[in-house]
Image: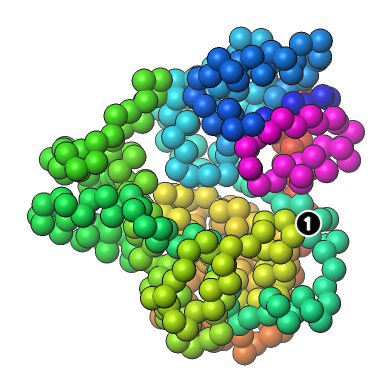
Amino acid sequence: MRILEFENHHFGVEDIKEALTEMGHELTVVSTPLFLERASEEFDKLFEEQITGQHYDAVFSFNYSAAVSTNCNRHNIPYISWIYDSPLLTLYSYTITNPCNYIFLFDSEQYLQLKNGGINTVYYMPLAVNTARLDRMPMNTRVHQVFDSDVSFVGSMYNEKGNFYERLENISPYVKGYLDAVINAQQHIYGANFLEDVLSPDIIKAIQEITPYTPNKDGIETPSYVYANYFLARKVTQNERFEILKAVSDHFTTKLYTHNPTPELPDVINKGPIDFYDNMPYVFKCSKINLNITLRSIKSGIPLRCMDIMGAGGFLLTNYQADFLEYFTPDKDFVYYESIDDLIRKCDYYIKHEDERKAIALNGYNKVKEFHNYKVRLNDIFKIAGLI
């Protein structure tokens, strides 16, 4: 098949190109920030130029683009969208009902929410890893000198100045107290997300007065969805990640790979941002414990970080996410923690018990390599889309 891909700084582009080539398909990649537009005459023109005189069996993208869907629908070309971000506002565009769409969600709870809401263009599909690329990355003494650590975490701390929650600093003391209590409660509950449910009309009205949100004209997202997933979920995650890394760094050598400084964590070795392709896998390979602390807007899905850790052969210690249990066995392929105290105990145990740690990492790696590689996933996607 010939497949056209549109993207804008997405992870996985090189991996999917390698997989499709090995499967005997041809991929053409167009990188443009216009991909992010919900509607754009300039993108429409680019799309027309790209397909004129050409035949493509499908158009593909990581994450969903309303502009791509509109053009695929106009030309009756199947549009395959594989989601790895959450939240993602474009999923609530009216265009997701376009019959050309095959939208694959990594979060089963979000998939069910949309499917049960009458959206018939969505499907559940976990994410994938190019283990062959990770296996080719050479290990040597220098790599270990740079990346070895007892515990490592790769991800945003959501502590950028002027973040969403900081915008509510002038809200009334009552509403601020209510939101802080909700955030604190959610932070200590795994496996259930109630942030959107507890935003009453009065609370939403108070937030709207401080930071107004107007839904997109072509969308069905609600203010409660936006405030819960962009304001509150990120604040929960920020608090959780700081609390966990503070506790872990009190006991173990802990490295953090993130964009912003973290002076509040003096015992954490903040290494700054890291490149997804060239260096991040070395963190996973060289760390005794790789933490996953899931962004709370991901309800049940297995984050890409987790797949990448296991696919690199790293040991994964994660919070509970329901979708794990569909594909992996706790304490055999990965380990999950139920509280900070539990996390510290498990870090201590698995750092001291190297053989068990390595056996679990190997089991997780083998399972990802066999069942969660790009070729397996793409074949599943193409079958659902009726292309093979």
Within the magenta stretch, is there residue 14? yes
135 to the left or right of 297: right
Kind of residue indicated by mark 1 = Thr
179 to the left or right of 108: left
Position of residue 235 relative to residue 112, above or below, is below
Total numbered labels placed on residues in the image:
1
Q: Which residue appears at 70% of the width and 24% of the height?
A: 59
Position of residue 188 relative to residue 119, above or below, is below
Q: Which residue appears at 75% of the width and 32% of the height?
A: 29
Return the x and y of residue 111 as percentages of the image width and height: 49, 37
In depth, the one of 282 and 167 nearer the eye is 167
Q: Which residue is mark 1?
A: 131
Q: Is residue 96 visible?
A: no
Q: Is residue 57 visible?
A: yes
Within the magenta stretch, is there residue 132? no
Q: Which residue appears at 67% of the width and 18% of the height?
A: 47
Return the x and y of residue 134 as percentages of the image width and height: 78, 60
183 to the left or right of 94: left
Position of residue 338 relative to residue 308, above or below, is below
Q: Which residues are magenta?
A: 7-31
In depth, the one of 326 and 154 nearer the eye is 154
Q: Quadrant of residue 125?
A: top right
Return the x and y of residue 331 as percentages of the image width and height: 60, 72
Return the x and y of residue 155 as percentages of the image width and height: 53, 61
Identify the image quadrant of the C terminus: top right
Q: Quadrant of residue 368?
A: bottom right
Q: Which residue appears at 82% of the width and 73% of the height?
A: 139
- Considering the numbered disc 1 on the image, is that residue within a helix, a strand or a loop? helix
